Amino acid sequence: MYHYLIAFGASEGNRSENIQDALAKIQSLGAMEALSQVISTPPYGGVAQGEFLNGALILSSKLSPETLMTRLLGIEAELGRERTRKWSDRPIDLDLILEKSGLVWNSDLLTLPHPEFHKRSFVLIPAGEIAPDWIHPVLNRTVLEIWGSLEP
């Protein structure tokens, strides 16, 4: 059984409804063990215009990392996500961030742990709420330690 940290966000359309729809669909992929509060954050990357709602969840699942990522991408597509431009507004964004055991995965589809999450407060704040002691297997630091070291 895998235990995944998944980050989610939305910046266009009915953001709260989009997140609720995504969470309902994710529940079919395993058991949701924890859900963070949803926070409002400014756009990241210089392209999106809308404020984001962001959060994180822990999912226990028998699905392999690549299978889970494929299913998450399918949920995004079902909810109207079109990947036309990096950093653009989107109805939903689902990212596989970390696996509790410290699994490292590199393929054309997926890099685990997520290669940029340790630089992003919009991921670290909700992740720190539900998985503060999970260890980044490459940096060998907990989520809480990484969050605490971010520059304001």
Image (cartoon, helix red, strand yellow):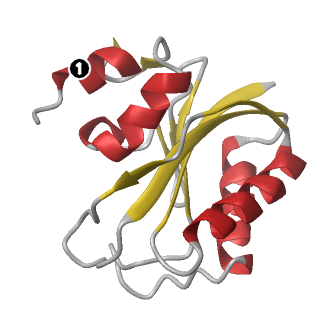
Q: Is residue 75 visible?
A: yes
Where does residue 67 sit, x and y in percent of width and height?
Answer: 75, 52
In front of the other: 49 or 105:
49
Q: Which residue is mark 1?
A: 148
Q: Is disc 1 placed on a helix, strand or loop?
A: helix
In front of the other: 21 or 76:
21
In front of the other: 50 or 64:
50
Q: Could you tell me which residue is drawn at 35 percent across and 67 percent down? A: 51
Q: Could you tell me which residue is drawn at 82 percent across and 59 percent down? A: 25
Q: Is residue 38 left or right of residue 119?
A: right
Please say if 75 is above or below 2.
below
Quarter where residue 144 is shown:
top left
Pointer 1: residues within 10 angstroms few (<14), some, or many (20+)? Answer: some
Please say if 31 is above or below 7.
above
Please say if 101 is above or below 106.
above
Residue most extreme to the left:
151
Where does residue 53 sit, x and y in percent of width and height?
Answer: 47, 58
Q: Could you tell me which residue is drawn at 36 percent across and 84 percent down? A: 85
Residue most extreme to the right:
28
Report the quarter where the N terminus lies. Answer: top right
Report the quarter where the C terminus lies. Answer: top left
Q: Is residue 96 left or right of residue 28?
A: left
Where does residue 29 sit, x and y in percent of width and height?
Answer: 84, 47
Residue type, label 1: Gly
Q: Is residue 48 left or right of residue 13?
A: left
Q: Could you tell me which residue is drawn at 17 percent across and 30 percent down? A: 150
Q: Is residue 116 visible?
A: no
Where does residue 48 sit, x and y in percent of width and height?
Answer: 31, 77
Please say if 104 is above or below 67.
above
